[in-house]
Image (cartoon, grey):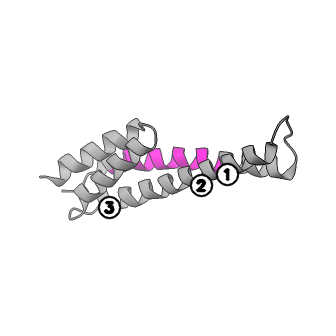
Amino acid sequence: MESKTGSILLMISGILTLLVSLGLIVLSILVFAGVLEGEGNVALGGAFLLVIGIVILIFSLLKFWASGLMKDPVTTSKGGVVALIVGILNGGDLLSIIGGVLGIVQGGK
């Protein structure tokens, strides 16, 4: 059985995560371009923001993939497990965790 509610929750979480990651990437580009200046090693800070933005972007793409898996009745529990793991790794993202649990429960039926 597919999990429409879990898929929708995961899609919302993926969109929010995508917006945060794009914001971090744009911020790092502004640091590298010299628009934002500060004291200390600014280039290292920009590189750190870029790496964090790319990692969060990968989490967002995994959420979109898991949401697609949860729409198929055969792979609903697999999508739920992926959503649960990504939600935990993403700092306890509640929408992903709830969507993952719903996917696992609906996939078991």
Picture coordinates of residue 89 (x, y %)? 42, 45
| Element under disc 3 | helix
Q: Amino acid at mark 2?
A: Ile
Q: Amino acid at mark 3?
A: Leu
Q: CA distance from mark 3 to mark 1?
A: 29 Å
Q: Quadrant of the N terminus?
A: bottom left
| Residue numbers of the magenta segment | 7-23
* Residue carrying label 2: 54
Foreground residue among 36 and 2: 36
Picture coordinates of residue 65 (x, y %)? 40, 61
Q: Is residue 59 left or right of residue 8?
A: right
Outermost residue toward the front in this view: 40
**Mark 3 packing: few (<14 Cα in 10 Å), some, or many (20+)?**
many
| Element under disc 1 | helix
- Numbered circles on residues, count: 3
Image point (43%, 50%), residue name: 11
Badge 3 or badge 1: first in the primary sequence: 1
Residue 109 magenta-highlighted: no
- Res 50 label: 1
**Mark 2 packing: few (<14 Cα in 10 Å), some, or many (20+)?**
some
Q: Can you tell which quarter of the image residue 97 is in?
A: top left
* Residue carrying label 3: 69
Residue 5 visible here: no
Q: Main secondary structure of the magenta part?
A: helix
Q: In this rendering, which labeled residue sits more in front, label 2 or label 3?
A: 2
Q: In this rendering, which labeled residue sits more in front, label 3 or label 1?
A: 1
| Element under disc 2 | helix
Instruction: Give yes or no for contact between labels 1 and 2 (Cβ–Cβ under 8 Å).
Output: yes
Picture coordinates of residue 99 (x, y %)? 32, 44
